[in-house]
Image (cartoon, grey):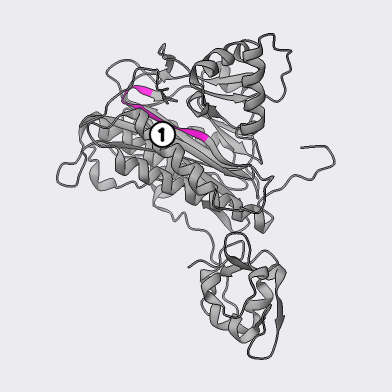
């Protein structure tokens, strides 16, 4: 972003729309991968399925905006048991086949015009209400889930990042678990997945001194990432090939090898500063060769595949939250069912118990009379094509919706092509709770 360009935030309705579009696609992609993750299914096939779904669905939005970038904000990764994160194998790598009892973590991200929606979810293969998970796997999943729920209630304007860190430590301890040391949750901005403000997990004494305290503010966006272990909470490089990278815009270097230059040029053209997988390149062998020089000179940042000790298990939950004026709004979330996990432990701290029992819902807006609803709509508001008759094709947006910016509103009943009456508006928006923050209609 150039100095004279104003940063776009969720104070703008259209930005909220793009975040929500990405969030919806991320949630759907996550559910697809979770539903497919059965015994005998390979991790590679799950990663490919998640990425393919994201690319297909993001290709359907803002089709007329030819210059708008959209797609994968974090490649689908499937990390099992003691593998902490970032396992997204290439076709040439050793694969892993799921089996009953595996604790699986699915992590992925979507962006629309650079506005990022990340999500991660944990579950145990074969878990059911008839066969619930008990023992340490249940402990760590319950601990991680409750940490995420606590964060949803603490990441709000006026609170500080240190409050979240301390809550996570206490909740994990209640389940005799440990947050993964030094892991960060980042503020999100357009095209930026690792913003300046962060929440740190289980910091060392030195990390606690160095980590910058920050206050959450209205109109900020965060990807809240919780990683909890049954073990010591120390993640190590397990020696598996790194397959996920992102460009570091602050670094410059004149690459010597032609293969490296060709590879890096494609990275800049296709992914900008978003994380990507080497699996996304047509010639995987050339990508593996080209990435070496780029990473060596720090043009690319690696997302290493990390592991806890063998025999331990790690659970992860990640969600994206918009800090709206009327409260935090979570736009991504996994299909968690607490009935599938039975732990003998529970949160003991009275303040945390009260926090977790409190509502995470945003403040509801006061209802207004129907006659004023049309005045609440902004130029960005849209309705479904099937809701209005007599609209010219020229009034439709690329995704088949009617744009108010292309319509005029008149007070009398009936409508001509290109116009819509206020009486029709009142019928359409009789229940204005159907209106989202960005004044779009939810059907």
What residue span does the magenta drawing correspond to?
A: 74-83
Percent across and percent down for residue 303 are 52, 22
Of residues 126 and 284, the one nearer the viewer is 284
Judged from the image, the secondary structure of the residue bearing numbered disc 1 is helix
The residue pinned by badge 1 equals: 48
Residue 325 in the figure: left or right of residue 307: right
Q: Residues within 10 Å of mark 1 (few under 14, many from 20)?
A: some
Residue 252 in the figure: left or right of residue 362: right
Residue 363 in the figure: left or right of residue 99: right
Percent across and percent down for residue 406 are 71, 70
Residue 318, placed above or below residue 60: above
Of residues 218 and 38, the one nearer the viewer is 38
User: Residue at left 36%, top 22%?
Assistant: 83
Tell whether position 277 is magenta: no
Percent across and percent down for residue 142 are 32, 38
User: Residue at left 69%, top 49%?
Assistant: 9
Percent across and percent down for residue 42 are 30, 29
User: Residue at left 63%, top 26%?
Assistant: 266
Tell whether position 82 is magenta: yes
Q: How many marks?
A: 1
Q: For the stretch drawn in magenta, what is the main secondary structure? A: strand
Residue 38, placed above or below residue 212: below
Quadrant where the N terminus is found in the figure? top right
User: Residue at left 74%, top 17%?
Assistant: 252
Of residues 11 and 40, the one nearer the viewer is 40
């Amino acid at each position: 972003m150039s100095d004279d360009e104003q940063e776009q935030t969720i104070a703008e309705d259209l930005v909220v729309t793009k975040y929500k579009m990405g969030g919806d696609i991320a949630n759907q992609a996550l559910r697809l991968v979770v539903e497919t993750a059965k015994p005998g299914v390979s991790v590679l096939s799950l990663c490919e399925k998640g990425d393919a779904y994201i690319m297909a669905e993001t290709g359907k939005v803002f089709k007329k905006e030819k210059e708008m970038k959209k797609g994968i904000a974090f490649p689908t990764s499937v990390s099992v048991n003691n593998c902490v994160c970032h396992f997204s194998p290439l076709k040439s790598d050793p694969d892993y086949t799921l089996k009953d009892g595996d604790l699986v973590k699915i992590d992925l991200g979507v962006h629309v015009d650079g506005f990022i929606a990340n999500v991660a979810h944990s579950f145990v293969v074969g878990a059911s209400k008839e066969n619930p998970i008990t023992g340490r796997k249940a402990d760590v999943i319950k601990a991680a889930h409750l940490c995420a729920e606590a964060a949803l209630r603490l990441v709000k304007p006026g609170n500080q990042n240190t409050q979240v860190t301390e809550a996570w430590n206490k909740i994990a301890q209640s389940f005799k678990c440990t947050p993964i040391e030094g892991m960060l949750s980042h503020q999100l901005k357009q095209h930026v997945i690792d913003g300046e403000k962060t929440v740190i997990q289980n910091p060392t004494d030195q990390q606690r001194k160095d980590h910058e305290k920050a206050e959450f503010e209205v109109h900020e966006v965060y990807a809240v990432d919780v990683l909890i272990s049954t073990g010591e909470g120390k993640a190590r490089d397990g020696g598996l090939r790194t397959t996920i990278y992102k460009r570091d815009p602050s670094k410059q270097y004149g690459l010597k090898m032609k293969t490296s230059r060709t590879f890096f040029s494609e990275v800049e053209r296709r992914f900008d500063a978003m994380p990507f997988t080497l699996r996304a390149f047509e010639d995987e062998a050339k990508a593996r060769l080209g990435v070496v020089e780029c990473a060596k000179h720090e043009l690319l940042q690696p997302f290493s595949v990390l592991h806890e000790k063998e025999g331990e298990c790690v659970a992860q939950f990640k969600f994206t939250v918009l800090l709206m004026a009327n409260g935090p709004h979570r736009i991504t979330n996994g299909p968690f069912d607490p009935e599938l996990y039975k732990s003998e432990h529970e949160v003991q701290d009275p303040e945390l118990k009260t926090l977790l029992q409190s509502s995470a819902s945003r403040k509801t807006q006061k209802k207004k009379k129907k006659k004023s609803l049309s005045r609440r709509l902004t130029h960005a508001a849209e309705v479904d094509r099937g809701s209005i008759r007599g609209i010219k094709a020229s009034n439709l947006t690329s995704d088949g919706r009617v744009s108010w910016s292309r319509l005029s509103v008149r007070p009398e009943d009936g409508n001509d092509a290109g116009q819509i009456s206020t009486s029709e508006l009142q019928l359409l928006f009789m229940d204005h709770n159907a209106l989202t923050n960005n004044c779009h209609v939810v059907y």
